Amino acid sequence: MLKFNVIGIDLAKNVLQICVISKHGELVSNKMVSRQKLKERLAKSSPSIVGIEGYVSSHYWGLLAESFGHDVRIISPKKVKGFLEGHKTDANDALAIANAAMQIGLKYSKPKNEEQQSLQSLEAIRIFLSRNITSLSNHIRAMLYEYGIVSAKGAARLRKVIEDTFEENNALPTCLISTLSIVGTISKLEKAKNSIVRQIKPCKQLMALEGVAEVCVGMLYSSIGNGKQFKNGREASAFVGLTPKQYSSGGKVFMMGIDKKGGVKELRTVLYQVAMSIVTHLPDEPKKVKQAWLIQLVKRIGIKRTCLTLANKTLRTAWAMLRHESKHEQQQLIAA
């Protein structure tokens, strides 16, 4: 017998499927409702477990449900699929979500607040634009050369040429001026995101971590939040994908490499780059305990594994700071 009712919601644009299971484990209803009807149902229902599949608008509905006192659980679609019985229909999907929400031991996420969503949205847009900036820059260089304007390699130099072109009169036709302004979009997004990061108190505290700047801090806060959804730092590290995969059978445990396809790939990449910048610039004579530890680690397991270990340590430290609202302690100096 459950302590609360379970509500499984299959998200869609206009018509949503809602499945309700009583605390006695009985199916109460499984029907389609409009957006307004769902809002009314969440407002009138007693505090319940609300299961939502990770999809577009999941955080919006999750925050709305939390405002009415419900326990919201956002579940990965891959995990929901294991509970699907029969054909893939809205009714079966909602039932699978409800069953997954009350499953013991299943990992789920909590809704992100407005600050986290803002940082995550800006970062997603920045990544999308940066993946296409090279081809776009080459296209713009070729177009400028048609008007006798030559640009050196590099996005910064191209941006400088475009700014100089804007200042000159009749350098380009008026209809092309607005098109070229798209090159500065990424830098504007970065400035907007960095400005938001510097205004958030937990992000200010995370800036004390070695090698961590606005980009990494924003991704840490948008992914981990206040850290309360994880029991410890290892769970947070496993969520990002920085812990090794484990294969156990017959009492024997085998530890393999990290899962490159799972976790939060973008955050894992940034943390690895931060660790690489620290490990590759270690002094010959360490002055701090952490530096001595890293030097010994490089000798024992190599640079790449040391970077993964340091990235794991950085993430766990960040989780502890967010979870306990504490500041980062300064490194101890090695006694002379």
Image (cartoon, rainbow, N blue to C red):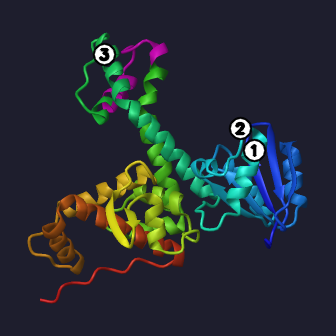
Whole-angstrom CA distance, mark 3 to mark 1, is 54 Å
Could you classify mark 1 by the number of other residues whose Cα lies within 10 Å: few (under 14), some (14-19), or many (20 or more)? Answer: some
**Left or right relative to 120: residue 84:** right
Please check the rendered image and state whether residue 170 is part of the magenta-colored stretch, yes or no: yes
Question: Which amino acid lies under the numbered mark 2 shown in the image of this protein?
Answer: His
Give the structural element (helix, strand or loop) at label 3: helix
Percent position of residue 9, x then y? 76, 50
Whole-angstrom CA distance, mark 2 to mark 3, is 52 Å
Whole-angstrom CA distance, mark 1 to mark 2, is 7 Å
Give the structural element (helix, strand or loop) at label 1: helix
Give the camera-side residue of 298 and 90: 90
11 versus 103 height, above or below: above
- Mark 2, residue position: 87
Q: Residue furthest bottom?
A: 335
Give the camera-side residue of 287 and 233: 233
Comes first in the chain, label 1 or label 2: 2
Of helix, strand and loop, which mostly describes the magenta segment? helix
Quarter of the image for residue 67 reads bottom right
Q: Which of labels 2 and 3 is toward the front? A: 2
- Mark 1, residue position: 92
- Mark 3, residue position: 142
Comes first in the chain, label 2 or label 3: 2
Image: magenta residue range: 159-176
Question: Which amino acid lies under the numbered mark 3 shown in the image of this protein?
Answer: Ala
Q: CB of mark 2 within 8 Å of CB of mark 3? A: no
Residue in the image at 50% along x and 43% along y: 124
Q: CB of mark 1 within 8 Å of CB of mark 2? A: yes
Comes first in the chain, label 3 or label 1: 1
**Left or right relative to 7: residue 243:** left
Q: Which of labels 3 and 1 is toward the front? A: 1
